[in-house]
Each structure stands twice: as structure tokens, then as C-alpha cells.
Amino acid sequence: MFDLSSYNTFNLTVYAQAGRVITAPEDLTQPLGGPYIILGAGSDVLFTEDFAGTVLINRIGGIELGSKVDERGAPNDLGDHILVRVGGGVLLDELIDYLLDQGICGLENLSLIPGTVGAAPIQNVGAYGVEIGTFIAQIEARDVLSGKQVILSGEQCRFGYRTSIFKEQGWSSLFITHVTFKLPLKFTPKVNYAGLQSCEFKQARALRERVIALRNEKLPNPKYVGNAGSFFKNPYVSAQVVAQLKERYEQVPCYPQSDGSFKLAAGWLIDKANCRGIKHGQVGTWGNQALVIVNLGGAKPHEVVALAKYVSAEVQNKFALDLVPEVRLYGKHGELSWDQI
Ligand code: NAP
């Protein structure tokens, strides 16, 4: 049995039948038989029970500056941008820190997001108005079922709100070995979120430090409190639903989208459903951000599931809105949908 407790940031004690640490794409040339799960830092997963298969852990390292997407070797006309090819096992926050030391910016709003570079494109991680997919020029992957290499351009990855092609059926067998980013050398601060608006940032590192401070104020550090970040996605609703909500809550936070819909803040809905800072057994919701479910010490997977179901039922009762997990759910035989747990 392979102990997964140090491979999931919820810190749940769960086991897989086997585990393999992957340090190079060549480790994946043999097609894999049987059930498998691909893991980065395990920061966006909930194991609901032990897994009867093999866990592949991405630890492919390396950061190459100035690499070319264009294999003809022609000098790319990148203007004031640079291409950076990164191993999928590199931690995203360590990459951001390193890039800023080299004068390369763009990713600073994503500071302190736990997880690896290889996992980040799967749910198109985002924070403070920036999504990682915007900067992805190319992804190299191995199909673990065939052992073949697959290369996708950024456009082919179909990045959306907390989603990408890698979550679609038929594409989930891709193990992301390298991500090539196209990043600006010139700093353009993105400061439309509260907490950033009133500050003047002359350097990208100052913006990174502010984001780190904001996150530390609000979010539990998985090093000390087991959690998987935002548990649920923010729901998108119609203008009609927003109008109805405003009759009851004048100040409801909502963000208009280009398609006419509105994004609601799941953390706000959970709070208003009286589920902020609650505790059920060894599991709770975080007092400073109700969207995060935390392991208060020695929690069991079923307790996390029970609390998540409770929270979503309370939001449904209060607002008639469905919350859907952002966290990926895994059971004995592989990935599960929300309705299956
Ligand atoms: P917050 O400021 O309390 O805001 C609540 C929600 O409202 C956020 O989820 C955010 O949506 C949305 N929002 C706030 N200001 C907005 C604006 N100016 N324009 C559009 N949408 C806005 O949230 P928080 O908990 O402190 O988190 C701050 C940021 O860190 C958010 O972007 C959040 O998504 C991000 N974060 C991401 C992860 C992850 O990727 N797993 C984990 C934790 C926090 P969005 O979530 O769409 O930005």
C-alpha cells in the first residue's frame, strides 16, 4: 500500500494500491494498465476513501528561460515577452518567486496558490483577476494509456473558468510534463480586486507581497491546517436571479460577465447560509473564508464529504442555488462526480 497522507493537502490518511514518483517524461513511455490518478502537490483533491489503483506523482523539475515554442528554430518575435518552459512538478509559487528575480512578471497575482505547474492548467487556476491559462503558450503531456507524447497550444487547451480540456472526457489521461509560458518583461499591475485597488505598485514583487499578505490574512496555510483551498466554485447566475437576491440582500456581491450572466461569491452564500466557521467532528469551514473546508486534526474522509454536503444543502435551502466542488473527488476506483458521493 502507498501512503497518500503527505500527497494530499487535506492531510487525510488514505492509501493507494501503488504510487510512482515521475521525474522525467520517459518514465511514462510504457502504457499503464489499471486504474490510475495523476497528482501534483495534491492541493486540489479530496480522497473520499482508499484508492484501488496507482497514483502517479508529478515531480518533473526544471525551468528553461527563453525556450522556443517554434521548433523550426526561427527566432520568435516575442517583443517584450519571454518564453519559459517549466517542468510540471515545479511548485507554482516557487516558479513565480524565481521569475520575479529574473525580471519576468505576469503571474504575481497567483502568488501563494499551492500546487504544481503541471496541475495548474487543469483547473486553470486563478486569483485576483488573473488566470494561468492566459499565459500558457504550449503544453507537453504524455498520454499514460498509450505512452505517447501530446503537444497542445494554449488555444487548444480550451481554458475556461476553473476548467480546461484536461477535465474533458477522453483527455484526462494526459500527464502534463512541461508547460511553456509566454510572459511579459514589462510589469503591468492588475489591481481590480479589493485589497489591491488602493495600492500603487511600482514593482511586480510588491504586488506579489501584497497578494501573499492578503491570502495569509484570509486563507489557512495547508502546511499547518489541512485544506484544499476553495472547496466550491463560484456559481454563475442570470440577471433575474441577481435581481431576486437584491430584494433580500441589497449588498449581494456579484460580478457582471461579458455574456450577461453574473458571478456570485460562493463564500458569501455559505456565510449567509450560516455555515461560516462551523465545525462537524474534526472538520470545519474556515472562519475568515467560508469557502475553505479544513481538517481540524485527524479528520476522516467521510467527515469532509458530510460537511461539504451539509454546506451545499444549506445554500440550496436558503438560495435555491447549487454549489459544485472546485476540488476533484476521488473514490476507490477513480474520479467521482459530486452526485456520486
Ligand atoms: P474575495 O475577495 O472574498 O471575493 C469573493 C469572490 O468574489 C472571489 O472568489 C472572486 O471570484 C470574486 N471577486 C472578488 N472581487 C472581484 C472582482 N473585482 N472582479 C471579479 N470577481 C471578483 O475572495 P478571496 O477568498 O479573498 O480570494 C481572493 C482571490 O484568490 C480570488 O480570486 C479567489 O478565487 C482566489 N483564490 C483562488 C483559489 C484557487 O484557485 N483554488 C483558492 C483560494 C483563493 P474569483 O474566484 O473568480 O476570482
Image: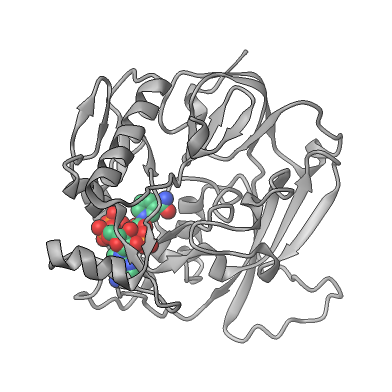
Left or right: residue 221 compared with residue 328: left
Residue 169 drawn at (x, y percent): 69, 48
Front-most of residues 10 and 243: 243
Residue 108 drawn at (x, y percent): 41, 65
Quadrant for the N terminus, please: top right
Residue 240 drawn at (x, y percent): 30, 70
Front-most of residues 33 and 245: 245
* Location of residue 80 (image quadrant): bottom right
Front-most of residues 208 and 218: 218
Ligand 1 quadrant?
Answer: bottom left
Residue at image location 49% in from the left, 36% down from the top: 339
Front-most of residues 26 and 142: 142
Residue 308 drawn at (x, y percent): 35, 35
Residue at image location 53% in from the left, 23% down from the top: 4
Can residue 135 be seen at all in this image of the molecule?
yes
- Asked if residue 323 is positioned above or below residue 56 in the image, the reply reads below
Left or right: residue 78 compared with residue 245: right
- Asked if residue 305 is positioned above or below residue 124 in the image, the reply reads above
Colour treatment of the image: one colour
- Asked if residue 11 is positioned above or below residue 184 in the image, the reply reads above
Q: How many marks?
A: 0
Q: Residue furthest top?
A: 1
Residue at image location 85% in from the left, 41% down from the top: 147
Left or right: residue 264 compared with residue 117: left
* Location of residue 202 (image quadrant): bottom left
- Asked if residue 57 is positioned above or below residue 164 in the image, the reply reads above
Can residue 206 be seen at all in this image of the molecule?
no
* Location of residue 235 (image quadrant): bottom left
